Amino acid sequence: MMNKLLLTTALTVCLALPSVAATVAEGDKLAENQEYTYWLLDAIKSMDPQINTDVEGSGVLRALFEGLYDEDQVGNLVPGVATGYELSDDKTTYTFHLRDNAKWSNGDPVTANDFVYAWKRLADPKTASEYAWYMELMQVVNAAKIIAGEMPVDDLGIKAVDDHTFEVKIEAPLPYFPQMLTHASTFPVNQKVIEQFGDKWTEAGNLVGNGAYVLKEHILGEKVVMERNPLYWDDEHTVITKATALTINDNSAALTRYLAGELDRVDIPAGQYPSLKEQYPDQAVSVPQSCSYIYMFNLDEAKGPAALKDVRVRKALSYAIDRDIIVDKILQGGQAPSYNWTHAATAGFEMPDIDYSHWTQEERNTKAKELLAEAGYGPDNPLKLTLNYNTSENHKKIAIAVQQFWKGVGVEMTPNNMEWKVHTDKMQNQDFEVARYAWCGDYNEASTYLDLFTSYSGHNNGKFFNDRYDAIMKESKTSANPAPLYKEAEQILAENMPFAPIYQYTKVEMIKPDMRGMSTHNLMQNWYIKDMYRVAN
């Protein structure tokens, strides 16, 4: 236990950071209408912070709940429920001070015990959260053994010192630990409400959150409606009164509805950014986003296809993809061709030298044919594979292009489209051969990507296992300079090719010119409805 003397000599940080809400710029006149309507491609699978795994779901959860910290318009940490923290001299004990005016939407005070309950719930094997591993990545004491079922959940290295003091002990210093606290899986939840309603606690009318908005309606696959929460601690600075997210599986149909005035924000379909930027220069936006788009290979011993067990086949499939055509001819939104996993703009990341990134596409195709022939595939024995992808015109266009690229090296690929929930369920159960996948960083540091392919990852759906890779990533947690280790990890991925990297994201979208506070300059593209407002025309 940290004694009083240590508390007084510890490093005190973040106490002076300003909170961020909708700060109306000088000269901006607010519109009478302060409602916001935006687009979702897929249904929100879960409103439970400890269960959700989706980027779109996280956007909703940041409105309904609030963790220890939020992010500002450029990605800097700002206080959420925490007003600041103290860090012990050995940098392994964080003592967070919680604001005394934070309330749940039912009027209950938000306390340190709410965070203790939520974090234990995340780590508890009974919860079966895909994000349980996040607690391990955060290095919380005993998290790994608890997640593995080898230790009781009450031994997790956290405690409520009192109602407004939350203590966290981690295994070793982790410089980016505070950045990890903006992730939805670390948000508090109300134990009383969960115990009262069980699995139905996330339904509209039952859900109690501590965010700037309350859930008024959720029709799965159709819409999510949220209204301003008058009990939110900073409600006086919240401007948007109502937010509606509409699920529209067809991106082109969503754009049509945007142009008709039904939406305030929508992603731009593949290939349409150049013309829309010319037509609507003050609405079309393309900025870097920390996400990587790949085709994941199923390497599961029991369920993966035999052909993909051969690294020559996996390399051939990756080499044959013409990434320049995908980004320059199909997407046309400023995306970058990718030959690695971690997004290039990630803070502190040093790009490794991946050999085939320097080859011409003709050289890659030639090598792909050679490798396939070595593996026993050719005109008399063509390799046949099925690619799963979730419903999206962009994903469909890429799948059709890759089908042709692979056909050029003698591979017969059948695209298989399905809705998001089915797609993700199949991936989690290793019920696929090749699957379209994308990962968006949970925080701005390379480990948010590279930890995914460890054996203990909750998202390693392709079941790639490599002892050296695991060792590198564990070593990186205590390294003063993990950059060289990250480079080595990327080289292992390139040598083993458990997935085919395709491109790195930009956020390409249309935003109504009267909207403000959209956080477009945050690499993580984490946005908060409470920071937004609409100006008068």
Image: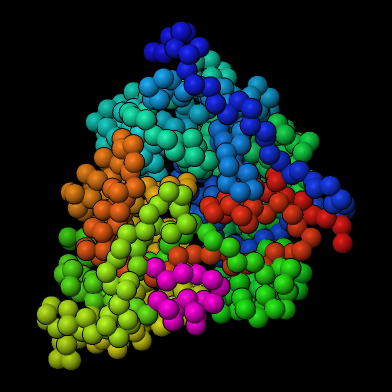
**Coloured how?**
rainbow
Q: Residue at x 57, y 39 (%)?
A: 77
Question: In front here: 532 or 222?
Answer: 532
Looking at the image, residue 183 sits to the left or right of residue 476; the answer is right
Query: Can you see residue 414?
Result: no
Percent x, y of residue 181: 50, 37
Residue furthest bottom in the image = 379
User: Total label count?
Assistant: 0
Nearest the eye: 58 or 482: 482
Quick check: is 327 in the magenta stretch? Answer: yes
Quadrant placement of the C terminus: bottom right
Q: Could you say which is closer to the camera, residue 25 or residue 157?
A: 25
**Is 218 on the left-hand or right-hand side of 143?**
right
Query: Is residue 471 visible to the viewer in this orientation of the structure?
Result: yes
| Location of residue 477 by image quarter | top left
Residue at left offset 14%, top offset 91%: 380
In this view, 52 is above or below 149: below
- Position of the N terminus by quadrant: top left
Q: Is residue 432 above or below residue 160?
A: below
Give how far across and how far down residue 487 sits, in percent. Answer: 30, 54
Q: Which quarter of the picture shows residue 249?
A: bottom right
Does the stretch in magenta take in 166? no
Residue 211 image offset from top left, x and y in percent: 64, 38
Q: Is residue 181 left or right of residue 535?
A: left
Q: Residue at x 47, y 32 (%)?
A: 118
The residue segment tinted magenta is: 323-338
In terms of depth relative to the viewer, which is nearer, 242 or 206? Answer: 242
Residue 345 rendering spot, x and y as whole percentages: 47, 57
**Residue depicted at x 19% and y 53%:** 466
